[in-house]
């Protein structure tokens, strides 16, 4: 698979990474561990060199899984993880239903780094993102803590997730930011207004999460699909049945383009992201080998300017229904 460089950094990764969250957390029961390990190893064989996890996924178990699965490839793959939640057991540890505590205090960041290094079985974290901006801790202090971890050789690159442009600039002035990870896809285009131009100006790479719209843009979900209560999407306004019904217009568009490109809707959704900027690296997640292969096939789908124009004009006629997060989680974004 082709490689991409995240912004002006020297961090080079496969054009498509693998989001590992859903293997343990978020979309229902965790995968069988041996199957998940086999999937991770097959991804490496297929050319994936960029893997995404976080302390909060599980919590902890997704990092452990990624650490075990990728142990034979230490030094050959890039593992990104994230800090920034307070995983006090008194709070809902999944950070999804109750009120998850944020904690980006410098001493906490250092503790998380030690734990992540152990769980991931590595000596240095390739890319360490702040998962959400913590309004109680100045971003300069966060960037300063990560800078110290870099100086100590425990972290290589600093990242932010769902941060607003002022925060990005302030952080970058203290410790250069290698990548921003935020939601971006054909149904979540907010980063285009301010965030992407700022990243381009500063030479920061962009890692779109939920690039398949949490599965919706693949066409495998419609208004009749049952989402279990353990599935995070059952709490997301955009996944309410009536919103799904309206949002299928976007899936129809992807299906039309896919038919004439001899590709699948998921591949078009990913190829569209890859076509936006050469420093964008999406991280689709899956628990299934055939879907991993399908998604990686997107790197070979070449959308022409005409194709992109067609997608743009059709998408501009569609208004996406429903917020991308429940209110208490939405307010943690864009700060
Ligand atoms: N920074 C953050 O705050 C943040 C937030 C969310 C996610 N993330 C990261 O981003 C990664 C990806 O995001 P995501 O998992 O939320 O969403 P996503 O990649 O947009 O979609 C994943 C969903 O799509 C399904 N899927 C994948 N490929 C498919 C295909 N070809 N056809 C049909 N269905 C397909 C998967 O189900 P199956 O497993 O059944 O294939 C899964 O339910 C995560 O793993 C995580 O590492 C970060």
Image (cartoon, grey):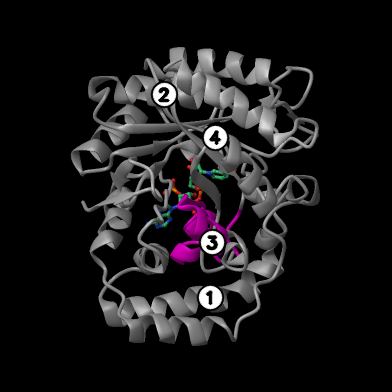
Residue under label 3, please give it: 196
Residue 82, how many percent across, how many down?
A: 55, 31
- Does the rendering let one see residue 126? yes
* Front: mark 1 or 3: 3
Give the answer, above or below, for where 211 lies relative to 75. below
State how far apart marks 1 and 3 are (Cα): 22 Å
Residue 145, how many percent across, how many down?
A: 60, 23
- Does the rendering let one see residue 215? no
Numbered disc 2: secondary structure: helix
| Mark 1 / mark 4, whichever is N-terminal | 4
| Mark 3 / mark 2, whichever is N-terminal | 2
Residue under label 4, please give it: 175
Residue under label 1, please give it: 250
- Asked whether 217 falls inside the magenta stretch, the response is yes
Dots 3, 2 in contact, CB < 8 A: no
Of 156 and 95, nearer the camera is: 156
Identity of the residue furthest to the front in this view: 173
| Mark 3 / mark 4, whichever is N-terminal | 4
| Mark 2 / mark 1, whichever is N-terminal | 2
State how far apart marks 3 and 4 are (Cα): 19 Å
State how far apart marks 3 and 2 are (Cα): 32 Å
Dots 3, 4 in contact, CB < 8 A: no
Residue at x-position 38% and y-position 43%? 9
Magenta segment, which residues?
197-226
State how far apart marks 2 and 4 are (Cα): 30 Å
| Mark 1 / mark 3, whichever is N-terminal | 3
Q: Which mark is residue 65?
A: 2
- Asked whether 210 falls inside the magenta stretch, the response is yes
Residue at x-position 30% and y-position 80%? 304
* Front: mark 2 or 4: 4
Residue at x-position 61% and y-position 43%? 231
């Amino acid at each position: 698979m082709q490689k991409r460089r995240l912004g002006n950094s020297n961090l080079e990764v496969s054009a498509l990474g693998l989001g590992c969250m859903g293997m343990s957390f978020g979309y229902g029961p965790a995968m069988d561990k041996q199957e998940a390990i086999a999937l991770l190893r097959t991804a490496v064989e297929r050319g994936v060199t960029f893997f995404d996890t976080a302390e909060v996924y599980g919590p902890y178990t997704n990092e452990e899984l990624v650490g075990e699965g990728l142990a034979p490839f230490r030094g050959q793959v890039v593992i990104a993880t994230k800090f920034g939640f307070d995983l006090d057991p008194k709070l809902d540890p999944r950070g999804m239903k109750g009120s998850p505590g944020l904690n980006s205090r410098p001493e906490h960041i250092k503790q998380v780094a030690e734990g992540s290094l152990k769980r991931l079985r590595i000596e240095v974290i390739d890319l360490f993102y702040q998962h959400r901006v913590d309004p109680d801790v100045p971003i300069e202090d966060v960037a300063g803590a990560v800078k110290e971890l870099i100086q100590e050789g425990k972290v290589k690159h600093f990242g932010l997730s769902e941060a607003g442009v002022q925060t990005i600039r302030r952080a970058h002035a203290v410790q250069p930011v290698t990548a921003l990870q935020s939601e971006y896809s054909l149904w979540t285009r907010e980063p285009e207004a301010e965030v992407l131009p700022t990243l381009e100006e500063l030479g920061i790479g962009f890692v779109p999460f939920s690039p398949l719209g949490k599965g919706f843009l693949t066409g495998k979900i419609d208004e009749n699909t049952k989402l279990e209560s353990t599935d995070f999407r059952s709490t997301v306004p955009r996944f309410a049945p009536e919103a799904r019904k309206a949002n299928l217009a976007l899936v129809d568009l992807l299906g039309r383009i896919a038919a004439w490109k001899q590709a699948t809707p998921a591949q078009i959704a990913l190829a569209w992201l890859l076509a936006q900027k050469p420093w964008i690296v999406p991280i689709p997640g899956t628990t299934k080998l055939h879907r991993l292969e399908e998604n990686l096939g997107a790197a070979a789908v070449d959308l022409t300017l005409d194709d992109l124009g067609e997608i743009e004009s059709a998408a501009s006629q569609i208004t996406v229904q429903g917020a991308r997060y429940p209110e208490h989680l939405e307010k943690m974004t864009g700060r």
